[in-house]
Amino acid sequence: MKVACEWHGGTLTDTAESAATLFADVDHFAFRTYWQPHRLMPVEQCLLDMNVAKPHLIGLHVFQWDVHTGDRLALADGESAWRQYLDAAKPSLPKGSFALLEFVKDDDPKQFLQDAKTLRQWLATD
């Protein structure tokens, strides 16, 4: 059995530093994390944060938000960022890991299907 936390603001994984402290305090091989970019943080900083998550990574929460406004966007709008995130995470993900679509533009089921198609295409080309 594994126990996993999420990686986002307002939690014990609010920053890379607080997440590192949490992992050190728990200090158990079965304690893992799902990683996701902080919604108002630039890609470069998100990638630095991911470095802290990598040894504990079990999966990704995938979505695209406008980095300035926090508005939800189509996943395809974040292709550059997500290709970087996927490339960075892939070597650290254990077998059986997955990417979970968490938020979609306008909470629209059709957008969810389009985002799923986009994600599958990206994963197929990696």
Image (cartoon, rainbow, N blue to C red):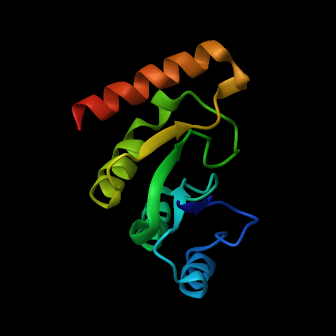
Q: Residue furthest top?
A: 110
Q: Residue furthest right?
A: 10
Residue 26 or 40: which is nearer the viewer?
A: 26
Q: Is residue 65 above or below residue 35?
A: above
Q: Is residue 111 above or below residue 90?
A: above
The residue at the point 51 percent across, 78 percent down is 28
Residue 95 image offset from top left, x and y in percent: 32, 50
In which quadrant will I find the C terminus?
A: top left
The residue at the point 72 percent across, 24 percent down is 107
Residue 31 or 110: which is nearer the viewer?
A: 31
Residue 38 image offset from top left, x and y in percent: 61, 57
Q: Is residue 67 above or below residue 123?
A: below
Q: Is residue 43 above or below residue 81?
A: below
Q: How many marks?
A: 0
The residue at the point 56 percent across, 39 percent down is 63
Residue 24 left/right relative to 51? right
Q: Residue furthest left?
A: 125
Residue 65 image offset from top left, x and y in percent: 61, 41
Residue 114 image offset from top left, x and y in percent: 50, 17
Residue 82 or 99: which is nearer the viewer?
A: 99
Quadrant in the rendering for residue 31: bottom right
